[in-house]
Amino acid sequence: MISNDENSDGMARPYAHPSRREIIVGAVTGSFAMGMPPDAAGQSQGSRGSAASEISVNLTVNGTHHALALDPRTSLLDALRDHLNLTGTKKGCDHGQCGACTVLIDGRRVVSCLTLAVMTDGKSITTIEGLAKNGTLHPLQQAFIDHDAFQCGYCTPGQICSAAGLIAEGKAKTAEQIRELMSGNICRCGAYTNIVAAIQQAMGQS
Amino acid sequence: MIGFQYSRASNVADAVRQMTASPGAKFVAGGTNLVDLMKMDVEKPARLIDVSRLPLDKVEEIAGGGLRIGALVRNTDLAYHPHVERRYPVLSSALLAGASQQLRNMASVGGNLLQRTRCAYFYDIATPCNKREPGSGCSAIGGVNRMNAILGTSDACIAVHPSDMCVALAVLEAKVRVTGPRGEREIPFVDFHRLPGDTPQRDTNLGADELITAVELPPRGFSANYTYLKIRDRLSYAFALVSVAVGIELDGGNIREARFALGGVAHKPWRKAEAEAALRGKVPGEAAFAQAADLVLRDAKSFGHNTFKIDLARRTIVRALSQAAWGTPQSQSSKKIA
């Protein structure tokens, strides 16, 4: 199984080798998960009587329209990752505490783990995969590289989407204000100093 | 998460009608608390009635000089609204002290009023909790209760209300407008949230079939002398150990009117009329502020891990009243406590 997610970490990928996820997904599909719908493992338990019926949801993600049929329990995060294969958005805590799943809905940053996908019907979603334009990195993506603003990189897509929201809000001017308004994005590697520097660089360009 | 039916309300009357027809349903707007509780199987609604698209997202001036805030106004939009920043800065400050910008972008005013407690035992379905399962017992009494209440507790529950916004609304003496099957009514803020008593499962006096449509602020906004001081384990993105919202009006050098409410210490934002009355006519200063703090905390009762909150609350009240009186309100971006 080949993922159509060519840019899952939001960074340019110069060589067309398979990603880690493509290899993992391929291995799992080939061994024991054949034919299992994307949500079955996580959501089959605890259904109330008959399974909740699926609801049609229209989403525009990074400019592309998608018509989905979703169990109402599906979070926007799971819809993006498991139904649209946009795995750049990360699942960290899944409880709105870490910010790894931050995306923009109609231009505003939110945590996609606490957003029910059915409630976003008709809305426009921007994920990390949608920030680069015509092969050119978004200024925040370039700034994160320039400032080495990550170590493991797991929180990075959320940090960058959150910073994109922050710049659009226009409320942060100083490093102190950036830190406060980015406090919803946790980085367990502790790259905060460089993250603030990267955001300041990108702010200067926008 | 337990399965549920999902439907959208087309207007306020339709929302109420759907709720009346579906006992066990819940309204959902921002979802920041409800969806989380559903993931933990603490909340198990049979149906979610999505009210997020109703036209209740306006902030409007009302006759007599007050402000009507639609129940669906997002926390960020309210915090940065020019009228709120200028006339009710204690509300703006309290909003920005709570949660993260992502959550404030999602969270509605009505939902903020209806936040459930963050007591760890309420979230842990493997433990007894009278709020989650009436009659099962309180695990926090005798348990790990560092975050729990010191005022207004009962033998059944020592949970605290987690909202920052509500602490400011208590000082501003807001009114909550609600619509139910019997029509509209208005609930004074002081009567909106309940003390746990022997029914801790009921956080508020809102009927199960009623929808919050707006919060109304009276004209008096304490825009010159106010503060929202929140003391917590981290400087940002953490619930209050103790928070204090203050509004003062000065007359010459003396206090004409002082209001203050505490967050993080009780099942509802905590005000004490006697303590506020004791400040009237006084010269602002540490002596008067300490006396007011003592009047509030005379009734405090702690449970072991949270004993420190009594001293912390005393000091936070004195500091917050000083910040308000000297016109140096707490900044929510610079964390230095002046």
Image (tube, helix red, strand yellow):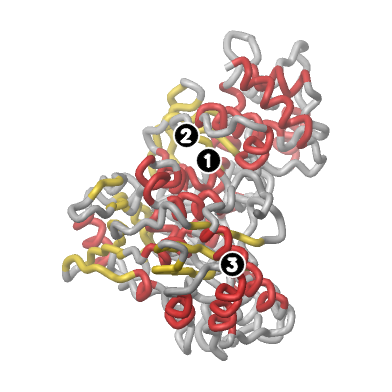
Distance between the Cα atoms at labels 2 and 1? Answer: 7 Å
The answer to whether the residue labelled 2 contacts the one labelled 1, judged by CB atoms less than 8 Å apart, is yes
Left or right: residue B332 versus residue A57 is right
Q: Nearer the viewer, residue B125 or B234?
A: B234
Left or right: residue B192 versus residue B31 is left
The answer to whether the residue labelled 3 contacts the one labelled 1, judged by CB atoms less than 8 Å apart, is no
Q: Nearer the viewer, residue A68 or B125?
A: B125
Q: Which quadrant does the C terminus of chain B fall into?
A: bottom right
Same chain for mark 2 and mark 1? The answer is: yes
Residue A169: give x, y in percent of width and height: 50, 31
Name the kind of residue labelled 1 in the image: Val
Q: Report the number of discs.
A: 3
Residue A7: give x, y in percent of width and height: 67, 21
- Residue tagged by mark 1? A110
Residue B165: give x, y in percent of width and height: 47, 58
Name the kind of residue labelled 2 in the image: Ile
Query: Compared to B128, does B33 lie above or below?
Result: above
Q: Residue at x 71, y 37 (%)?
A: A155
Name the kind of residue labelled 3 in the image: Arg
- Residue tagged by mark 2? A105
- Residue tagged by mark 3? B118
Residue B23: give x, y in percent of width and height: 32, 70
